[in-house]
Amino acid sequence: MKSAFSLLVLFCFLQVRAGHPEQEHNKTENSACPIRLKPNGQCGDNEECPYQVTLPPLTLQLPKQFKMLERVMKDLQNLKEDLSNLKRSCLECKQQADESQPRNTDEAPTAEDETGNDLKEIQSKLKKMSISLKNTKNQINILQSSSQEMNEKKVEEIVNNVLQNKLENCPHDCPFMSALKDIRVFYTDCSDRYSNQEVKNGIYLVTPDRHNSSFNASCDMESFGGGWTVIQRRVNGDVSFNRTWKEYKDGFGDLRGDFWLGNDKIHLLTKAKDMVLRIEMEDLDGVREYAKYAQFYVSNEYLKYRLSVSSYSGTAGDSLHFSKHYNHDQKFFSTPDKDNDMYPSGNCGSYYSSGWWFDACMASNLNGIYYNKKYKGVRNGIFWGTWHNISDGQPNGYKQAFKSVIMMIRPKNFNP
């Protein structure tokens, strides 16, 4: 760019070079060259004359890379300054470290020693503050635990007492009476309904999570102390359990007959309270047994409705923890169209025509096909691996079938 500019100046200069400086000036003013030359003093003895050169404004079109180059140079300069500051800081740190080295104990205390004592005092205060914060946190946890003890039942009792006092002192035309029509009491599950003196079996509205919609649930209020929320029932085989992931997610069937409540609903129920699972089974020979688990929880859909179940008791045997390779605890839910099981060579849900917490594959499957008589072939019917007289699995042997299966849950702290 500089060489091009020099050639331009030289070209215009040659046009006015010959003759007297005044003539050069006149020619320059009349020429087309935009550069102006003007005498600026007397000529010297060495025949050199001073001139003042006036250049016109120049507009140069430069590529975009020049702007990027300018930005890079600026960033580079900033980095150099940061590096310089870091070096300076490191040097100061080193000097401070050298000065803080232990001295001869015979020397008198200096300002640096006093500074060290101040630092120790600050560290001691910080340690005390940390202990204080820890104690405060513990107190907060205690308060939170205490507040959780004020459960919905106690709150409901308080509300009922207040309402009772209002009703006793309020005439029938009182606005408070009309407002009562808009008050809605929420029941987390069937045990709350039972506690509200609703002790007959039936379909009741429950709301385990007030951020989600309420839904109907089948409540067993008469068996084993009542308050049970039924999450699955197989009694007649009218409903197929060979369903998709979405159908198991939302639930299907008839709440008064065969049904699956829905994995989302089961998750909300087990999330709201610590639940106990009770499974009632009866085979075609009329033998009845049960399995009870003191801990039962189903995760959300993001965690593939993972099952957490433990603390077995009962008469049917612990089929959910059958063996190392057939352990349904901590397993994901699988369906014929969604393979989340531990079997590497296929989909257990598709093979056994149901949705369940399969391992690789199963020692239990209460959602298998409902057979009204013993059957042969693939063991794809309702199955509980620890049931008495279960076939040893011979390909052509008859498999045990079940007349009824009911899965129901209730809060661990429920008192009938």
Image (tube, helix red, strand yellow):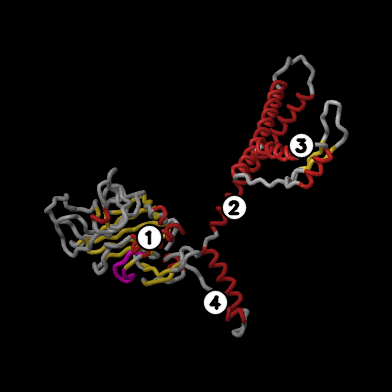
Nearer to us: label 3 or label 4: 3
For numbered disc 1, what is the local secondary structure? helix
Rendered view: 36 above or below 184? above
> What's the residue type where badge 4 is placed?
Asp
Residue 188 position, x and y percent, is: 46, 65
Is residue 127 shown to the viewer in this render? no
Cα distance, mark 3 to mark 4? 105 Å
Q: Nearer the viewer, residue 14 or 217?
A: 14
Q: Nearest to the eye among marks 2 and 4: give it.
A: 4
In this rendering, which labeled residue sits more in front, label 1 or label 3?
Answer: 3
Residue contact at pointers 2 and 4, CB within 8 angstroms: no
What number is the disc on residue 17? 3
Mark 2 to mark 3 CA distance (whole Å):
99 Å
- Residue linked to disc 4: 182
From the top left corner, tell me how far across and down residue 219 is, in percent.
37, 68
Span colored in magenta: 253-261
Q: Which residue corresponds to mark 2? A: 143
Dot 3 amino acid type = Arg
Tell me: 183 left or right of 120.
left
Q: Reading the chain from its start, which is encountered first: label 2 or label 4?
A: 2
Amino acid on which the number 1 mark rests in the picture: Asn
Q: Are marks 4 and 1 in contact (CB under 8 Å)?
A: no
Task: Tell me the tag on residue 263.
Answer: 1
What is the CA distance from the residue labelled 2 to the residue labelled 4? 33 Å
Pick whichever of labels 2 and 3 is earlier in the sequence.
3
- Pick whichever, 111 or 82, lies toward us: 82
User: Residue 23, can we see it?
Assistant: yes
